[in-house]
Amino acid sequence: MKFLAMTAVLIMLVSCTAVKLSVPSQFSSQATKMPVKGINGWKVNQQLSFGNYQTSKIKRGWDFTSSLQYTKFRIRPEEALLKVFDINTDNNINTQRSRFQYTIEDGNLVAEVYATEKFKEKQLVYKSNNPWIGDASKTKQYEYAFTAAIVPLTIKNENPWSLVLINKYDIAKDTAHRLFDRPYVEEEGYATNGKESIAIRPLRIENVTTQSGKNTKVLGGKMLAGYELQWDRGVVAIIDILDHSVWLQNSLEPADKLILSSISSAILLKRMQDVEKDEVME
């Protein structure tokens, strides 16, 4: 998956004039786009700002990464066949965890955000003593979970919100068979305070425009470009992770905008964005 991601990015950088998330005019005409400052660059004392929203300095805990590789004692027939060509197989388990916290305010209202990110991947590793073949690996299964608690501090009688983003892959359930098919993954995203819920839907780009004006598909499958937030079945916010911007519907109450801005900033700050292609927390 990582090779395909690198290929897709290379093609877009070389042959495309721009890679943009298309925001429907029906929504953009009733919303405000706010470029986000502070995403790129030095992460020490990092702060985000967009529109009239400002975060405190982002406090990040220690990132945890571990890798465990072990030899299988029971092998399948196809793995036994590989041994004829001096290719052995091992299992590898990669685990990553990170966390961060901050406050966000609009000049009047304030909320605290506590976030945790977890990733666990099981790989099948192919090892060869032949320098022409080398080593390789493929993902058998992974589980990614991003959770955050959002606590409004200045909104009376407002319950805390829970933000959840889940992305899971299992090769046994994968229906992608062609080389450049997007793997089948299970995804779920929402935020809730126990009374109301906000659905979080991933937005992906399938086509890009080349310098010659030709419309072509992204190699390696659709590329994650952002998220759409739906409240009461209507779109109220869009998070653009490519352009680093947040769109908020104009008619929302300040308290609702604060919650949506908290969700948006937390998602923009997480280490892994396109889980299927990142694989490593940056």
Image (cartoon, rainbow, N blue to C red):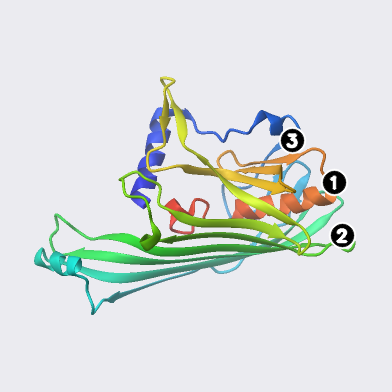
State left or right for residue 40 relative to residue 149: left
Q: Nearer the viewer, mark 1 or mark 2?
A: 1
Going 23% across and 79% down the picture, which residue do you hit? 73
Q: How far apart are marks 1 and 2 (CA)?
A: 14 Å
Read off the residue under disc 2.
154
Residue at x 26%, y 76% (from the top left corner): 71
Residue 120 horizontal/vertical position (percent): 45, 67
Q: Considering only order in the chain, which callout, 3 or 1, is on the residue closer to the N terminus?
A: 3
Determine crowd level at label 1: few under 14, some 14-19, many 20+ residues with C-alpha closer than 10 A.
few
Q: Where is residue 248 in the image (x, y as percent from the top left)?
A: 73, 41
The percent position of residue 173, horizontal first and vertical second, equals 40, 60
Residue behind mark 3: 32
* Amino acid type at image mark 1: Glu
Q: Is residue 137 above or below residue 95?
A: above
Q: Is residue 28 left or right of residue 91?
A: right
Identify the residue at horizontal 37%, vertical 45% (top origin): 181
Tag 3: amino acid: Thr
Query: How far is disc 2 from disc 3 in space, using C-alphas?
Result: 24 Å
Residue for point 31% across, 59% down: 138
Q: Which residue lies furthest to the left in this view?
A: 84
> In screen coordinates, is 203 left or right of 248?
left
Q: Is mark 1 on a helix, strand or loop?
A: loop
- Residue 253: which numbered mark, if any? 1
Check disc 2: other Cα within 10 Å, few if <14, some if 14-19, many if 20+. few
SS at badge 2: loop
Q: Position of residue 174 (x, y in %)?
A: 38, 56
Query: Height in image: 92 above or below 15?
Result: below
